[in-house]
Image: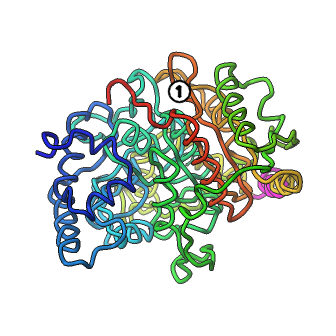
Amino acid sequence: MSTTQHTAWHETGVGALADSLRRREVGAVELAQHFLARARQQQALGAFLAIDEEATLAQARAQDAALAAGTAGPLAGVPLAHKDVFVTRDFPTTAASQMLAGYRSPFDATIVANLAQAGCVSLGKLSCDEFAMGGDNESAAVAAVGLDSPQPVRNPWDATRVPGGSSGGSAAAVAAGLAPAATASDTGGSIRQPASLCGITGIKPTYGRASRYGMIAYASSLDQAGVMARSAADCALLLSHLCGPDLERDSTSLDLPTEDFTRGLDGSIEGLRIGIPREFFADGLAPDVRAAVQAALKEYEKLGAALVDISLPRTDLAVPVYYILSPAEASSNLSRFDGVRYGHRAAQYSDLLDMYKKSRSEAFGEEVKRRIMIGTYVLSEGYYDAYYLQAQRLRRMIADDLQQAFTRCDVIAGPVSPTVAWPIGAKTDPLSAYLADIYTLPASLAGLPAMSVPAGFGDAGMPVGLQLIGNHFAEARLLNLAHRLQQATDFHQRRPAAA
Ligand code: GLN
């Protein structure tokens, strides 16, 4: 096996792996086997919901052939894994729900196809909160590979703690070196928050940059695909291939040419104005997170950037607004799971209505049902104006506040999560979980690109992420800032002891 020749393929970044593959220092099959072996060794993390060695090796063999023939794409043979909300032909897709247990899509999501087109090999599907609703990956209702029952995904830095969510499987897999990179989705923070809690780098592009075709819908006006990897440079490389217009299949896809996000990575940040929203540093931010984030901001000052005090006065409203709008959209999106066309169907029922009721009652988990009920309520006649319409108005005002802020600064920075990763089972009431999303929601509601960059460590040695938020289409600038921090610090290179 490869491990005897090269013990550290899982320590190697995406760009370097692509180079080694091109130089034929390692084969795509060998690399896929290396990572599959690691995934097998670390099944207890619960990161993977589906592995199919044959399917992976078939993809890898095709890439080896392309490399030998000189027809290979730029990322030929680079292994990665996909969050289980992206439909895939070669692997089952469940969104971690019993509703879709065993489901197999007849097509690949556009972002999956885009990455495959560049040459990436899929290692399988990664766990998440059910239908991407959550922030701790405790609500996955499908058993992970090698485990007998559905379990929360574990944080590789401390297996008694959550990895964050909803993309907890993606973050845990990358942090533990089970995959060099992973796709993920972010509706209200699900790329940034688990990346922060697992000490890796993650970016969500501008809404509309990445196709939503084949991404199982949670809240369509917010859902956006992105990537996680160890470094900003790796994220830039992958994002350049993941994004791109898909006008015929996604009505909200932006008609923008693909962009090479790696081009500006080394650019100077001298004189750049970084806005620091005072509301992101108010009560509620844990002292250890505050200290790590402030230390990272000091690094930026050393690199020549200027820190500017700004205000996002409606920050507190982001949580209620998001938790009205996203359940409203979810209640509509999830109505398609009715037991008729696809998904779970109850074994016994008396009539059509009873079949709907039983199928949905049996197969949706508690949090999903809660959101369907909230969403149905806020959209119902009599409450629509008071809740849904009001929330839409406030969403616009929150977005306007951000635009106002961008007249005074080029990029906004702050914490991702108010605390480091918490113990599994610690957040039992939904409200306390919702409140923890406060710093990630404004960018989501405004459709802005945002990322999490490792910024240090807090209590119990757990990772802390720095959030960077850019104006629309400023991905390259965010990645440039993140890369510069990673040239000045080594937080992104630290590994959990178990990995
Ligand atoms: N934690 C947020 C929620 O529960 C965000 C989820 C997401 O981005 N998919 O909805």
Quadrant that contains the C terminus: top left
Locate residue 428 relative to residue 439 in the image: left or right. left
Q: Residue 407 location in percent, x, y?
A: 88, 56
Q: Residue 33 location in percent, x, y?
A: 17, 50
Locate residue 280 relative to residue 477 in the image: left or right. right
In the rendered image, residue 456 lying in the magenta stretch gets the answer no
Residue assigned mark 1: 421
- The amino acid on which the numbered mark 1 sits, given as a three-letter code, is Ala
Residue 142: tell me if it is visible: yes
Determine whether 381 is above or below 111 in the image: above
Q: Relative to the observer, which residue lies in front, 175 or 153?
A: 175
Q: Main secondary structure of the magenta part?
A: helix
Within the displayed image, which quadrant is ligand 1 positioned in?
A: top right
Kindly identify the residue that appears in the image at 40 percent across and 57 percent down.
355
Q: Which residues are magenta?
A: 381-396
Q: Residue 119 location in percent, x, y?
A: 32, 68
Determine whether 353 is above or below 232 in the image: below
Locate residue 428 relative to residue 89 in the image: left or right. right
Kindly identify the residue that appears in the image at 24 percent across and 77 percent down.
70
